[in-house]
Structures are given as C-alpha cells and as structure tokens.
C-alpha cells in the first residue's frame, strides 16, 4: 500500500531562497549538536522563515533572520548532555546552566567572523517583551525584531516537539499557550515584579507575531488536509478496484462450470497489482478500508481544529 506522506515542516522549508554556498558555513556549524537540538534548530529556522514571509519582511531580512534562527541554540554545544537531555524537570541549578547557552552561543558567534553577523539570534531568543526573559531581562524597546520573531518560533516548536505531534491535530492547545504568553503577565513574584509593573501592558511574546503564527499554522493545516485528501483519493481509487475484484469473485463462486470460474478468475487477475493475489486480496482490501476510514476521520478532525483555531483571539 502506498504510504501517506506529510512533512510537518515541509512548507516552511528554505528551498525557495536558494541559500548560496557561503551560507553553508553557518548551517554546517550545527553538525556537532545532538540530533534533537539540531532538528529543533532546523525547525525553528523553518518556522522563522515562514513568519518573516507572513510579516512581509524583505528577502534579505528573511534570510538573515532564518540563519539567526538556525544558530539560535548553538551554545548548547557546551551544555552537559546529562542536563540538556534530562527527561524530567530541571532543578533550579540545572536551569541556570541551561540558560547560559544564550551567552555562550553569542560569544561563539562573536569570535567567528562568519558567524558574527548572526549573533543576535543566540543572545535574544529568550528575552521577553515584559522584561521577564533572559539573559539580560530586556524589554520590548531593547529586543531586536529578529529576537522577537525567533522567540515565538522557538517556543512553538519546543512545545510541539515535547508533545510529539505528528500532525496538526491538537495544535490549538499549543497556540493557546503562546497567546497566553502574549498577554500581560499576572506574575506577582518579587524577582519580576518591578519589570512586570513597568511593562504591565506587555506579555512575553509579541502579539503581532503570534497572530502571524496562527496564519502560518492554519496554512499548514490546510496543506496537511490537501496531502491527506490526495491519499484518500488514492485509497478511493483502490477501493473501487477491489470492489470490481470482489464482484468477479462473487460471480466466480456462483459459476456452475469450471470454464466460467476460470473466466471470472482471469478477470480478477486483471485488477491485481504488485504482490496481490487470490489468497491475500481480501486482507489487503480490508487494510485499504481501514486506512480510508482513518484518513477521513483525520481530515474531519483537522477541520474541527481549524474551527477552534479561527476562534482564538490574541
């Protein structure tokens, strides 16, 4: 049976930008990262690229911002694996170590002339508009636009990856978290109180960028539906083929003579494909039926997800 193909980030790829060979140096800097972190960096770059497109950024800024996003977690090269890959909740001390990846990454970029132009992504992607981020606790006026964009892309992919979504089903819950983080903070902790009060009208995320993220997600869900529908169409065509096989099978069973039975058997063979045969076609036919029902249900669920997302307010 043909496999359904849907790449969660396919439409967020940079293929259309045809990055020149000189830029491969920046991308190759990720080779030493663990597989999970590298994949996350690639995902964040892909989402960042789409966000820039929807924000109507120039081609030059989009390329620049995307490279910044590729490199945003490069500092994690120097975070101990037992902390970086810890499955459970981090202690306060471990979290403090994790947070150093921003300044470490920045220093790495600044020491390399080819990476230096993209240092902003490493330093600013965890800064929050209301001043509760790190490493410097900057507020909106001091956080570069690329940092604000990458923050949203980073937070989105981090949640999606943690929940191990293989499809956009349930993605509305992730968007709700980003929307909540775009609203003014209700935090009353003493360490953040002053900055929260001073920036009471701001959340952590830029609302305009979160709104655009919703558009990107909706676009990708429609794309996923289109991919799924293509597969459903493929299944429907095969179900029609198997219905014809079943029709001739029933006629064969009702035939009175061996000649008639062989006649219908030959017709059945005309519709067999690949390794299908008289002995296994019923099992394969049932597999196609099951796959068809699952994909139809998936499409319905995705449409329901769209309805939920369209009602979200930032």
Image (cartoon, rainbow, N blue to C red):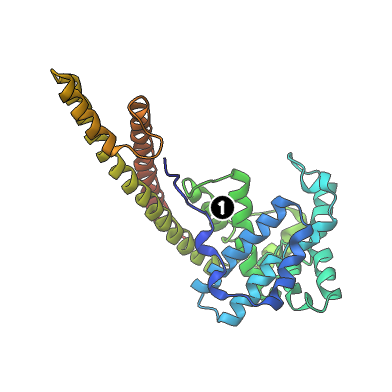
Viewer-proximal residue, 274 or 94? Answer: 274
User: At 77% from the left edge and 62% from the top edge, which residue is drawn?
Assistant: 74
Q: Which residue matches tag 1?
A: 177
Residue 45 appears left or right of 8? right
The answer to whether residue 145 is seen in the rendering is no
Q: For mark 1, give the secondary structure.
A: helix
Task: Tell me if residue 218 comes above or below residue 129 in the rendering.
Answer: above
Task: Tell me if residue 277 comes above or below residue 11 in the rendering.
Answer: above
Q: Determine the image quadrant of residue 215.
A: bottom left
User: At 67% from the left edge and 71% from the top edge, which residue is drawn?
Assistant: 67
User: At 59% from the left edge and 56% from the top edge, which residue is drawn?
Assistant: 156
**Residue farthest to the front, as pictured:** 259
Q: Position of residue 132 (x, y in %)?
A: 71, 61
Of the 4 image quadrants, the one containing the N terminus is top left
The answer to whether residue 208 is seen in the rendering is yes
Residue 176 appears left or right of 270? right
């Amino acid at each position: 049976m043909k496999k359904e193909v849907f790449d969660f980030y396919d439409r967020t790829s940079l293929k259309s930008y045809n990055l020149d060979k000189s830029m491969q140096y920046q991308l190759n800097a990720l080779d030493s990262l663990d597989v999970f972190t590298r994949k996350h960096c690639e995902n964040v770059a892909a989402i960042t690229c789409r966000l820039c497109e929807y924000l109507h950024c120039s081609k030059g800024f989009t390329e620049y911002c995307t490279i910044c996003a590729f490199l945003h977690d490069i500092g994690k090269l120097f975070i101990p694996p037992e902390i970086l890959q810890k499955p459970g909740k981090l202690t306060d001390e471990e979290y403090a170590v994790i947070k150093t990846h921003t300044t470490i990454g920045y220093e790495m970029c600044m020491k390399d002339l080819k990476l230096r132009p993209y240092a902003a992504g490493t330093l600013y992607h965890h800064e929050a508009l209301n001043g509760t981020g790190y490493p410097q606790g900057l507020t909106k006026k001091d956080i570069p636009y690329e940092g604000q964009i990458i923050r949203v892309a980073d937070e989105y992919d981090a949640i999606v990856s943690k929940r191990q979504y293989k499809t956009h089903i349930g993605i509305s819950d992730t968007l709700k978290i980003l929307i909540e983080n775009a609203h003014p903070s209700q935090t009353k902790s003493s360490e953040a109180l002053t900055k929260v009060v001073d920036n009471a009208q701001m959340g952590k995320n830029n609302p305009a960028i979160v709104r655009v993220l919703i558009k990107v997600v909706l676009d990708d869900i429609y794309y996923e539906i289109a991919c799924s529908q293509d597969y459903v169409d493929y299944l429907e065509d095969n179900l029609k083929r198997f219905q014809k096989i079943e029709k001739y099978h029933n006629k064969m069973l009702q035939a009175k003579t061996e000649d008639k039975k062989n006649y219908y058997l030959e017709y059945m063979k005309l519709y067999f494909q690949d390794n299908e045969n008289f002995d296994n076609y019923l099992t394969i036919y049932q597999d196609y039926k099951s796959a068809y029902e699952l994909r139809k249900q998936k499409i319905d669920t995705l449409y329901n997800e769209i309805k939920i997302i369209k009602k979200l307010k930032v």
